[in-house]
Image (cartoon, grey):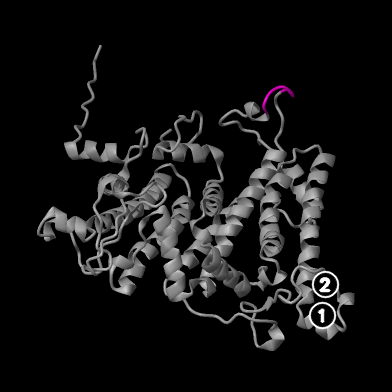
Amino acid sequence: MTAILERRESTSLWGRFCNWITSTENRLYIGWFGVLMIPTLLTATSVFIIAFIAAPPVDIDGIREPVSGSLLYGNNIISGAIIPTSAAIGLHFYPIWEAASVDEWLYNGGPYELIVLHFLLGVACYMGREWELSFRLGMRPWIAVAYSAPVAAATAVFLIYPIGQGSFSDGMPLGISGTFNFMIVFQAEHNILMHPFHMLGVAGVFGGSLFSAMHGSLVTSSLIRETTENESANAGYRFGQEEETYNIVAAHGYFGRLIFQYASFNNSRSLHFFLAAWPVIGIWFTALDIDGIREPVSGSLLYGNNIISGAIIPTSAAIGLHFYPIWEAASVDEWLYNGGPYELIVLHFLLGVACYMGREWELSFRLGMRPWIAVAYSAPVAAATAVFLIYPIGQGSFSDGMPLGISGTFNFMIVFQAEHNILMHPFHMLGVAGVFGGSLFSAMHGSLDNPKGLWVFFYRLGLSPHRPHGDGLQGS
């Protein structure tokens, strides 16, 4: 008998290192982008935590009037922030070794520049790592494309805008109240709310949240029950199952009857592309909007306005909260002059959308679906009722209601902020988190159409604790 011995080729140390870096068998995928991402994000996170807790006051304006932002200097989790680098430093690269002492570096806000530059480099590498992992798993690259929107927005407020202003002191503070204070100052200096690109961004963010809520509630209402009535419907789902978890035909039929025949997608892939593209494109435009322009605010298209600046002007303050139908005025001209159309439109609109919500519940009931679609729709109904009815009642006049137009809407936001400082209200902060979070989840869900691929991807990124089985993708 002849024994044949096969000689294995020895792999060099560098080759083994490369294989380990690019292996999809690791619990956390590293990748070549991860080699730079991990130290930069760890540095940014560590310095942020230490500075948020214990950093001394910073001379942000360069006028020897330091501003405290850390917890140990009298702030709480809401008011605390990493104060931007001093205006005395401007745009100079200011590492710790460039200062005469650590105390001077802290006094001039050195931690802010350190955190921001490491953070931006880290999230850019995180985006590259998403693309790299998609490539290794044989997936398409849309996850990294979707993530480019928040990366672009962060780069705009932390780097591009300070460069345009000539100082890192004009960058956004790293804290909750600091973020909203930055928004107030930005609006005061640049009137950004009237910029068309910002309007596209708002449409993208709010639209993304709306579509996320619509899709989630519609899926939840049309689940294919595989459990008894005494068990949760969620218990009937098996991870990696081949069959659909909800009835897309029922969902399509629901929306086709609720609105009109072609109002809903009959292609799940087109739907998820739309969910991803809408908020991402909107946030891209917001990132482009870093200087701001001014737009006029008044009346109809025939009186010198365009589709952006035109609006239905609220009912006159002389009318107050009185019911003002057309027959109560001496003439049609008087009714128009006092803004009668606004009250007519608003009251009919609010009654109509409330009935639309009830119709959603009724149709769900008739089709044997659960009522979550109507519950999700109650959020925009509540918001519309607040700005068109509840707030004017509180102010004593429909003239304080929100104008019905694009620029009018943003002008209302400006006035509301000036009078009530709503950006600092905790409930508004929760609303902002909900809207931006909804857009984020919509973009994430839309860019990851394949549920198996989604969990493999998130598992390798370290964002899912459950190891997927039988996913059929390379490296699982």
Please state, as top left, top right, bottom left or bottom right, where the N terminus lies in the image.
top left
Give the x, y percent position of residue 203. 58, 63
Above or below: residue 306 compared with residue 210 = below
Q: In percent of the image, x 69 and y 59: which residue is there? A: 390
Mark 1 to mark 2 CA distance (whole Å) = 8 Å
In the image, is 122 to the left or to the right of 447?
left
Q: In percent of the image, x 56 and y 61: which residue is there? A: 204
The magenta span reads: 228-232
Residue that label 2 marks? 324
Give the x, y percent position of residue 303. 69, 88
Q: Quadrant of residue 352?
A: bottom right
Residue 412 colored in magenta in the image:
no
Q: Give the prevailing secondary structure in the magenta stretch.
A: loop
Looking at the image, can residue 190 be seen?
Answer: yes
Residue that label 1 marks? 335
In the image, is 374 to the left or to the right of 208?
right
| Residue type marked 1 | Trp
Above or below: residue 150 compared with residue 340 = above
In the image, is 397 to the left or to the right of 135?
right
| Residue type marked 2 | Tyr
